[in-house]
Image (tube, grey):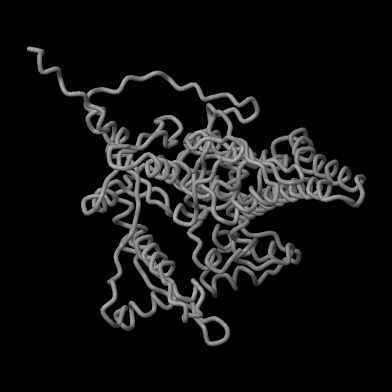
Amino acid sequence: MNKREVFHSGDDPHRLHISPPGTRNIPGTDGVWAAHVEQDTFFAQLAATTKSLHEQGRAIEPATGLKQLEILGRIRSMLDAAEAALLADTYELTSQQAALSGTQELLVEDPAQAQSAEHFGVDPAAEPLIRASFISEASGALRQGERIVQGKLFNAEGLRHLCPETLNELGKGTITIKSATEIVHQAQDLEAEHVKQMQEVLLPIARTGSDRSVKDRARKMRERFLPEPAETRHEKGRETRSVTWWPEADGMAVLQIRIPAEDALAIINTINWHATKHDDPDDLRNEQQRRADIFRDALLDGWPAGNGTPLKARVALTIPVLQMLTDPTRTLADLEGYGPIALGAALRLAKDAPSLMTVLTDPWSGAVIDVGRKKYRPTKALKDLLRLRDNHCRFPGCNRLPESSEVDHVDDWAKGGHTNRDNSQLLCKRHQMYKHALGWQATYMADGSVNWRSPNGILQVELPGSVTNVQNFDFERSQTPMLPASELPARVRRVLGWFDPPDSKAG
């Protein structure tokens, strides 16, 4: 867990729609049979998988070693599931015990406890105090810091009492703890039925995709399910604007600014643009150093100090017109590099945009299918399509933005591959090198996903970044999603630029 997650976590168990501590059913308190089933679920599979790995012996070739790492990853997920279940259940037992006795159970009875509690003005049976005490105990048992255990307890409660399907997948080793944690994190403030829908959509992705792909889609789903309109939440969020900092070693420090996402992306994209356009051969700074210096100089010296080009905001966003026409109050735009933002903020940005482009998205999966071709040459239109469809480099787990990626042929041009949307994807320079020089293989599937095979046979599935729903995808049989037939009304066709004017001869 990094410093930002430790000191700036907004996770709060009170925002999870679950019963309060001390009132929850857990295996063992509602029957011996359930406790035995639970024991087998989390520990029998773990023991069998660990034994299987042990019996394989040491790897003598890369492919075998990578397969064993896969098994080890599943074991780690199983351990994380067992830890989450045990942590949540132990806290529940502690809360139930306190509810029955009016205080926490002590190894040694202390008659002066009540007097001490009165002196300090605390209630030993209060939930916050029970929680804090339990976290301290669990920290000692796990030999981890209290802030880390506090975060683990939050995730454990969410998995055990709100996201049991996710906990079950984690227990089978089919998903990672990071994906499971992200699902719980994004489940805050959502009703149980929406959390269930979220799991139905995200778990198939988590079984085969990267943690990053789960995080991006979970954020978008949460935004759609939250009862309060995005615009209202955005206005409240603006009230939390702040600048903080903390010291680092060697006379350095970290500066952190909290501002609206569209402003943050405009700043970072502008800095990146100027840093990469810099071509002074006598400048020995690397790109990261130039980025930091541009930011510093802009604030302190009014950069550029001379007559250079002033900083200009550079952002890209997608506004789903079909959703906007259907229900403007629930529509979310997508800010490239960030994710979902309120429609109002997007429209304010679009109002001053120097250019606009028509984009057609699949209303069921969210995938970008086509872009307008009235203004751009086909090669430019293809680049626009890939930028909006893929969102970032299509290598599993890579999130380099389109500006840092290039159009790549899935089936190589030299081997007869065509330059079209069915044979093109965004890949950053690094992962183009993986594919073309290091033996990584990419196979474009009929449903729009890409199957990646490592040089030693490790398989991973990567979906287009714009896809939000994989209900109709079939990774194994290459089945094209079957979408319901629909007819676009004249109003929608007109917005998309497809409206045909009436025949002049008609009366």
Of all residues, the one furthest to the bottom in this rendering is: 251
Residue 282 or residue 243, whichever sits in front: 282
Residue 307 position, x and y percent, is 26, 79
Residue 227 position, x and y percent, is 36, 42
Quadrant containing the N terminus is bottom right
Residue 95 or residue 456, whichever sits in front: 456
Quadrant containing the C terminus is top left
Of all residues, the one furthest to the left in this rendering is: 507
Q: Is residue 139 above or below residue 408?
A: below
Q: Is residue 241 above or below residue 413?
A: below
Q: Is residue 126 above or below residue 445?
A: below
Q: Is residue 229 above or below residue 273?
A: above
Residue 82 position, x and y percent, is 73, 48
Residue 394 or residue 422, whichever sits in front: 422
The residue that appears at 56% across and 69% down in the rendered structure is: 3
Left or right side of 176 for 277: left
Residue 206 or residue 15, whichever sits in front: 206
Determine the image quadrant of residue 451. Answer: top right
Q: Is residue 165 visible?
A: no
